[in-house]
Image (cartoon, rainbow, N blue to C red):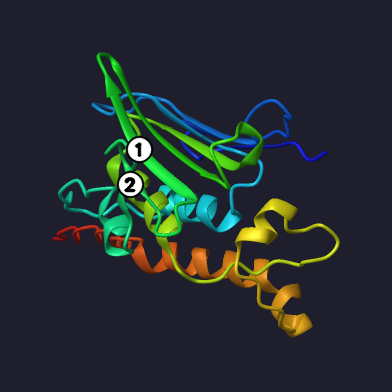
């Protein structure tokens, strides 16, 4: 069973992958920084890795010099055709399988997301939790990845796609070049590294010492 712990360069963030049959597999805790309070997120075992990657990509992306207005995390979902849930709490996907809700009650403030075939607890496919203090642009990165219509590339055999998901999802069988799969991780790491290089500020050349006057 894989167990991975990654620490951010500033020692402020901790990403943990720890398979737990009774809890989330992925969890991230971030310490307070300045006015930003501590926050945390967690993802269930079957959360599509593309959604988790959308969140971590935004987390590691270079910070813009000028702060932008806080985005609306519901925005990408509304643009993708999501609608109000049954009790007008949060938004539901067009097929009714996924639901996202910003829950606030007194001092409680958090975001929930889940995908389930039905209301039966046994039909739950995956669940995610984001504390209310999670920066809005990171929550929006999560909802943007969730609303992305691009198909998820999966090996259908053996049991790479859960049976209850296979009954609901639109599955298309296609052959992919071996090189596309073999070097996918390497290309992704290279692309992220290049993004950081392009966004890094240009180094300031050192000042030349002033010439000394001689007699």
Q: Earlier in the sequence, mark 2 or mark 1?
A: 2
State the separation of the CA atoms marked 2 and 1. Answer: 6 Å
Q: In the image, residue 133 lies at what x, y percent?
A: 32, 29
Q: In the image, residue 102 lies at what x, y percent?
A: 31, 34
Residue positioned 50% across, 51% down in the render? 97
Q: In the image, residue 196 lies at what x, y percent?
A: 43, 62
Residue 48 placement, left or right of 40: right
In this rendering, the answer to whether 169 lies above or below 135 is below
- In front: 163, or 157? 163
Q: Is residue 34 visible?
A: yes
Residue 159 placement, left or right of 83: right
The image quadrant where one finds the N terminus is top right
Q: Which picture quadrant has residue 175?
A: bottom right
Residue positioned 70% across, 66% down in the render? 154
Q: In the image, residue 148 lies at what x, y percent?
A: 43, 65
What is the secondary structure assignment of the residue under circle 1? strand
Which mark is drawn over residue 91?
Answer: 2
Where is mark 1, residue-wise? Answer: 101
Q: Residues within 10 Å of mark 2 (few under 14, many from 20)?
A: many
Of all residues, the one furthest to the right in this rendering is: 158
**Are the residues at dot 2 and dot 1 in contact (C-beta closer than 8 Å)?**
yes
Residue positioned 61% across, 72% down in the render? 187
Residue 118 placement, left or right of 205: right
């Amino acid at each position: 069973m894989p167990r991975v712990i990654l620490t951010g360069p500033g020692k402020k963030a901790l990403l943990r992958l720890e398979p737990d049959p009774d809890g989330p597999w992925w969890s991230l805790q971030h310490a307070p920084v300045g006015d930003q309070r501590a926050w945390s997120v967690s993802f269930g075992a079957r959360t599509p890795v593309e959604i988790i990657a959308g969140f971590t990509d935004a987390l590691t992306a270079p910070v813009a010099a000028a702060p932008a207005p806080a985005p609306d995390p519901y925005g990408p979902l509304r643009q993708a055709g999501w609608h109000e849930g049954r009790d007008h709490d949060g938004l539901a996907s067009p097929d009714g399988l996924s639901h996202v809700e910003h829950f606030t009650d007194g001092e409680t403030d958090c975001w929930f997301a889940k995908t389930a075939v039905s209301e039966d607890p046994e039909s739950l496919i995956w669940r995610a939790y984001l504390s209310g203090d999670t920066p809005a642009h990171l929550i929006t990165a999560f909802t943007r990845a969730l609303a992305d219509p691009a198909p998820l590339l999966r090996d259908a055999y053996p049991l790479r796609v859960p049976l209850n998901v296979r009954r609901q999802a639109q599955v298309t069988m296609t052959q992919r070049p071996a090189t596309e799969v073999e070097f996918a991780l390497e290309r992704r790491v290279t692309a992220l590294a290049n993004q950081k290089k392009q966004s890094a500020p240009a180094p300031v050349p050192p000042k030349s010492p002033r010439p000394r006057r001689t007699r």
